[in-house]
Amino acid sequence: MAGKALSLLPPLLLATAGLAGLLLLCVPTRDVQEPPALKYGIVLDAGSSHTSMFIYKWPADKENDTGIVGQHSSCDVQGGGISSYADDPSKAGRSLVECLEQALRDVPTERHAATPLYLGATAGMRLLNLTRPEASASVLAAVTQTLTQYPFDFRGARILSGQDEGVFGWVTANYLLENFIKCSFNGVFQPPLSGSFIAFSAFYYTVDFLRTVMGLPTATLKQLDAAAVTTCNQTWAQLQARAPEQKARLADYCAGAMFVQQLLSRGYGFDERKFSGVAFQRKAADSAVGWALGYMLNLTNLIPADPPGLRKGTAFSSWVVLLLLFAALLLAALVLLLRRVRSTKAQNVI
Ligand SMILES: *[C@@H]1O[C@H](CO)[C@@H](O)[C@H](O)[C@H]1NC(C)=O
Ligand SMILES: *[C@@H]1O[C@H](CO)[C@@H](O)[C@H](O)[C@H]1NC(C)=O
Ligand SMILES: *[C@@H]1O[C@H](CO)[C@@H](O)[C@H](O)[C@H]1NC(C)=O
Ligand SMILES: *[C@@H]1O[C@H](CO)[C@@H](O)[C@H](O)[C@H]1NC(C)=O
């Protein structure tokens, strides 16, 4: 009896395999689009009074498209700017650790090695490099030493010129507003002939000071010019009386206001009509508007894109052949099974 049951096993197995093949081929399938992998980039904005870290992200398959890069998270480094550690450079490196630890958590582990990390230093370090070049070099060496200890793709710590800072700020602002025509961008900036335009951080803080603290209108270029002149004509005591809490920055507003007015009118060629389209903002599209994003956009332009996610598909004709093959297998197995069953019955009768 057991031998007979055993003799039925091969055709049964064959039938099962055929059936399984048919079922698998007939399971409804649909085309699946793999969610685009995200890429990340980190910029440390080492300003004169403090350092901020910005983490950006963008879909890996669209990295050259405009308006794609967004801010993922940010972190404010505790303590002063890195130039304030001129007398004890190793502390400049250590001051960044807390934010870098946050970056380790914010960027997925599998992306760490492919995430570019930049440090750009501005006014404070420019000044230190002028007065004590060896101290500025030690501070940069100290932060470099700290940054290379992290698993990110560290691309260097540099001092940006004032001009770089300006260019990258405009790049950021107008990238966020999608004013760039395709990310024609080469660090070269052209104001658009029409449309809105945003003026970022230093511009924002200067104009905000003229409006709120000085109580001066800044709606037109002429008013901006007059507001700058009025601010510059204030005595130190008058300025201090107006905004005692801003004492550290008060000395800069006269020069700042003049610079903004001159840069907008002469540098970038805004006339009264185009000036009405300029908005002074601190943030755009949820990203802080500073030079950091523009800097990263320019420098990461060379990162190759990930290949798109691939899935295997079966051509229709091969699918039909497979279907017929499994059907034939199933049929053959059934015929075999039937014959075996018959022969066992016949033996039983005998
Ligand atoms: C410091 O200033 C000198 C002279 O302007 C310049 O050549 C050098 O590149 C600066 N250092 C850094 C790190 O930018
Ligand atoms: C942008 O990046 C390129 C390549 O890294 C560099 O040659 C160029 O000078 C950068 N643009 C600015 C304005 O620094
Ligand atoms: C500058 O201030 C002085 C005294 O406060 C005033 O007489 C003068 O008109 C001001 N000049 C401008 C250009 O506002
Ligand atoms: C983005 O631009 C770079 C340099 O022009 C190029 O090598 C890269 O393939 C581009 N990436 C995509 C996704 O088009």
Image (cartoon, rainbow, N blue to C red):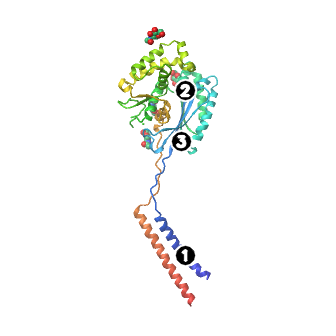
The percent coordinates of residue 281 (x first, y second) are 47, 29
- In the picture of the structure, the residue carrying the numbered disc 2 is 47
Residue under the point 49% across and 65% down = 24
Whole-Å distance between the Cαs marked 3 and 1? 53 Å
Q: Which residue is mark 1?
A: 10
Image location (x, y in percent) of residue 166? 46, 26
Dot label at residue 114: 3
Q: Residue furthest front?
A: 215
Residue 332 percent coordinates (x, y): 47, 76
Q: Residues within 10 Å of mark 2 (few under 14, many from 20)?
A: some
- Reading the chain from its start, which is encountered first: label 1 or label 2? 1
Q: Quadrant of residue 178?
A: top left
Mark 1 within 8 Å of ligand 4, using the beta carbon: no
Between the C-alphas of marks 3 and 2, the distance is 26 Å
Which of pointers 3 and 2 lies earlier in the amino acid sequence?
A: 2
Q: Contact (CB < 8 A) between labels 3 and 2?
A: no
Residue depicted at 44% across the width and 68% down the height: 323
Q: Is residue 271 visible?
A: no
Nearer the N terminus, badge 3 or badge 1? 1
Find out whether the residues at labels 1 and 2 contact each other: C-beta distance under 8 Å: no
Quadrant showing the C terminus: bottom right
Q: Secondary structure at mark 3?
A: helix
Q: Please tell me whether mark 1 sits on a helix, a strand or a loop.
A: helix
Q: Quadrant of ligand 2?
A: top left
